[in-house]
Image (cartoon, grey):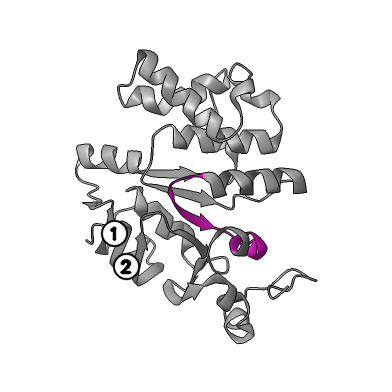
Amino acid sequence: MTSNSSLEIKGLAYAYPDGNQALFGVNLNIKRGERVALLGPNGAGKTTLVMHLNGILKAGLGSVAVGGLEVDTDSKETLQEIRQRVGIVFQDPDDQLFMPTVREDVAFGPINMGITGSDLEDRVMEALVLVGMTDYADRPPHHLSFGQRRRVAVATVLAMKPEILVLDEPSSNLDPASRRELADILRSLDVTLLMVTHDLPYALELCQRSVILSQGTIVADGNTFDILCNAALMAENRLELPVGFEPRK
């Protein structure tokens, strides 16, 4: 693996126990600091791919390496390190927020890494500063708006200081102001970003590079603007721009 890679996937193939083949020899290299959108229709294999990044699923064939460390689902120590390096923010923030206060939610991961005392408090506050939620540290997460909860969910992952931040449909269910605020936050982060999304304008806004996954294989990998302007490629992969949205404008 090259030293400047955050993520390197080689020949990744996977079939579910029922025999459904979800991935067919996927190859993908993401450099440190890159921002990449993972696009594709429902059923393309995007979620299956993401679940290999932190060892939730075990590769049938091929390999996945994060920051030079290969994912090994048979090694508890390696998996623990990988799950620190790969921060996944789920589509529903309530899947990640379960403690009485925002502070405790953000502290949960670092505590499990053995971080305590002033170091723990520094981690928590640093993550909350990054997402603009320091004033809400002692609030119950369920008292926050949906957009605020999503920002706290991002903070819970940032507190682990991941190598790569993976976001599953980050703009879904956000009002326009929350959508813009999250975009500003994501632009400000010094981290490798992989964004799984159907929101093509958001992909164009935040990710210079896009990858299209279709039927378990990567069918396009290039500049986001160029991909969104390729009408034939978009149609072939059931990707549609919102009515009135024109990338060239």
What residue do we see at 43% from left, 47% from top? 191
Using a 10 Å C-alpha cutoff, classify the residue at mark 1 as few (fewer than 14 neighbours), some (14 to 19) or many (20 or more). many
Label 2 amino acid? Answer: Ala
* Residue 71: x %, y % from top left: 25, 51
Question: Which quadrant is the C terminus positioned in?
Answer: bottom right
* Residue 91: x %, y % from top left: 58, 46
SS for dot 2: strand
- Residue 173 forms part of the magenta stretch: no
Label 1 amino acid? Answer: Ala
Q: Which residues are magenta?
A: 189-203
> In which quarter of the view is residue 83 placed?
top left
* Numbered circle sitting on residue 13: 2
Q: Which residue is mark 1?
A: 59
Question: Which quadrant is the N terminus positioned in?
Answer: bottom left
* Residue 176: x %, y % from top left: 76, 49
Residue 190 to residue 47: above or below: above
In the displayed image of the protein, which residue is found farthest to the bottom? 232
Q: How far is mark 1 from mark 2, CA to CA?
A: 6 Å
SS for dot 1: loop
Residue in the foreground of this view, choosing between 136 and 145: 136
Left or right placement of residue 50 versus residue 90 in this view: left
